[in-house]
Image (cartoon, helix red, strand yellow):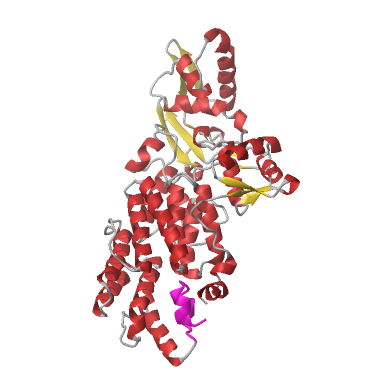
């Protein structure tokens, strides 16, 4: 495959050593000047029939390189060679999104251009907080790219869909999309893919420019893509309690809502060990009666607390209630009435004669968890937590139930696994897994493949069509074009 043809499919590596005939080499060298910062945009040496296509692909490469100045220059070059106005508008849309500004509304464009416009619209809606509409547009862009057969735009649309899926609270679906893309997408796409994969909480995410893990450890990260910069700022605030909380994070950090914002939803997921025990991804930091704030696990190491006051221990799903009680008391502005506390934890009304002993046992178990210097007090108005010098403990309210754990486990196994494999991974019975998956199958989230003992479950995404290595390899693309 020539360097030019490879670039048209999103693989820019061949441009560094273009092959093929003399004309192709000249075109590839001109495209290299457009796609990198080695030379200013110059299309004089490129055959006119290819100039407009080359500039479009070069704009995507500039986006992947986070190069706003090059996007501006490419837009000027598009106007100079007489490209349709929509082409320059699309390039300007990427530049505006990089700056954190809303892209232009959908307009007229050819097949590839329409896909980019819809993808831009999805990202813009996501930044505006309209996750539902962003999902609609991301799904549409992915289907269009698949139907039209533009492989490099399928990379783009799939990454956008994964980003939207994560913000919609489905990091397991995002992880599946991105893990598959990571096996087939050429190098220049890996920075964005690896970043998004790391933001799902996927431990196997590789090195990348937009390093979420560096932000998790409090390091300064320079990012020129505004949506990523905002996410990294949110991560930093969720790890360093001394920092002011961004407005979009405030309600969650202050304990008023339990669903984590999209910026940190993947990183807030608990880990599950081989014994089916959860290791919390989110903790509560209580610094005084009624003074508390959530933080991500990575923020524990930076706390100026004795190790005994950092309660980092695993628990099974049926062992989480002592921490639930501590969390309810930590975020309460004052004493919590016994009846209200019981109902929040157990989900039904409190009857003193029937439930008094249950609540007393729960309080005793919670007191056994906390170290000397902290205490749970009880008065006429109810119970309250005195954290002493400070107390950090898991917040099970930000965990996931067994259904979510099953979905995550499926996603980590390339989207398919047997009931026994899932049961072993989660430390529960196969019957429990089968009951959960039955509901997921009815909802269309999973499907059963095979029968009897040979059967396994497959994670479904009605939009994402797994880009197999064969289909997205140069050989597979060439075969599809014949």
Q: Position of residue 42 (x, y in %)?
A: 31, 83
Up the image or down, 250 lies above or below 383; here it is below
Q: Is residue 99 left or right of residue 159?
A: left
Q: Give whichever of 439, 421 is nearer the camera.
A: 439
Q: Give whichever of 365, 92 is nearer the camera.
A: 92
Q: What residue lies at 64% left-to-right and 35% top-to-bottom?
A: 435
Q: Give whichever of 310, 182 is nearer the camera.
A: 182
Q: Position of residue 44 (x, y in %)?
A: 30, 87
Q: Is residue 119 left or right of residue 211?
A: left
Q: What residue lies at 52% left-to-right and 10% top-to-bottom?
A: 351
Q: What residue lies at 61% left-to-right and 50% top-to-bottom?
A: 458
Quarter of the image where one finds residue 142: bottom left
Quarter of the image where one finds residue 382: top left
Up the image or down, 293 lies above or below 25; here it is above
Number of marks: 0
Tell me where the magenta segment starts and ends, as one range: 1-19
Q: Position of residue 235 (x, y in %)?
A: 42, 47
Q: Would residue 201 be seen by someone viewing this image from the given angle?
A: no
Q: Would residue 160 be seen by someone viewing this image from the given angle?
A: yes
User: Residue 111 lies in magenta, yes or no?
Assistant: no
Q: Position of residue 339 (x, y in %)?
A: 47, 15
Q: Most extreme residue toward the right, as rendered? A: 453
User: Residue 18 lies in magenta, yes or no?
Assistant: yes
Up the image or down, 116 lies above or below 430; here it is below
Q: Most extreme residue toward the bottom, as rendered? A: 22
Q: Most extreme residue toward the front, as rendered? A: 482
């Amino acid at each position: 495959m020539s360097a030019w043809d490879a670039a048209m499919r999103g693989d820019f590596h061949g441009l560094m050593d273009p092959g093929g005939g003399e004309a192709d080499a000249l075109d590839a060298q001109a495209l290299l000047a457009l796609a990198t910062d080695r030379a200013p945009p110059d299309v004089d040496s490129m055959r006119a029939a290819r100039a407009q296509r080359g500039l479009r692909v070069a704009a995507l490469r500039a986006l992947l390189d986070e190069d706003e100045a090059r996007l501006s220059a490419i837009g000027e070059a598009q106007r100079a060679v007489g490209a349709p106005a929509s082409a320059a508008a699309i390039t300007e849309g990427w530049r505006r999104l990089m700056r954190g500004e809303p892209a232009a509304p959908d307009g007229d464009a050819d097949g590839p251009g329409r896909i980019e416009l819809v993808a831009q619209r999805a990202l813009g809606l996501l930044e505006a907080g309209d996750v539902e509409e962003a999902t609609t547009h991301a799904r549409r862009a992915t289907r269009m790219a698949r139907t039209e057969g533009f492989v490099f735009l399928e990379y783009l649309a799939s990454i956008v869909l994964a980003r939207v899926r994560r913000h919609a609270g489905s990091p397991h679906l995002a992880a599946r999309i991105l893990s598959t893309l990571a096996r087939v997408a050429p190098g220049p796409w890996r920075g964005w893919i690896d970043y998004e994969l790391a933001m799902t909480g996927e431990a196997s995410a590789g090195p990348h420019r937009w390093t979420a893990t560096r932000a998790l450890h409090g390091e300064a990260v320079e990012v020129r893509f505004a949506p990523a910069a905002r996410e990294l700022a949110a991560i930093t605030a969720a790890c360093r309690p001394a920092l002011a909380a961004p407005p979009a994070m405030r309600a969650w950090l202050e304990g008023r809502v339990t669903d984590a914002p999209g910026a940190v939803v993947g990183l807030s997921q608990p880990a599950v060990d081989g014994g089916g025990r959860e290791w919390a991804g989110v903790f509560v930091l209580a610094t005084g009666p009624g003074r508390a704030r959530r933080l991500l696990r990575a923020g524990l190491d930076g706390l100026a607390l004795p190790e005994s006051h950092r309660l980092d221990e695993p628990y099974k799903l049926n062992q989480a209630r002592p921490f639930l009680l501590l969390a309810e008391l930590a975020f309460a502005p004052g004493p919590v009435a016994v009846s209200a506390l019981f109902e929040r934890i157990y989900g039904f009304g409190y009857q003193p004669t029937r439930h008094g002993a249950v609540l007393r046992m729960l309080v005793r178990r919670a007191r056994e968890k906390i170290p000397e210097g902290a205490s749970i007090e009880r008065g006429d108005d109810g119970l309250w937590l005195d954290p002493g010098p400070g107390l950090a403990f898991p917040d099970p309210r930000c965990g996931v139930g067994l259904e979510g754990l099953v979905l995550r486990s499926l996603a980590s196994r390339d989207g398919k696994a047997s009931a026994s494999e899932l049961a072993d991974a989660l430390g529960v019975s196969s019957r429990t897994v089968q009951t959960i998956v039955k509901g997921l199958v009815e909802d269309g989230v999973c499907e059963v493949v095979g029968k009897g003992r040979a059967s396994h479950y497959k994670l479904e995404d009605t939009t994402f069509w797994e880009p197999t290595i064969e289909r997205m390899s140069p050989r597979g693309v060439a075969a599809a074009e014949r």
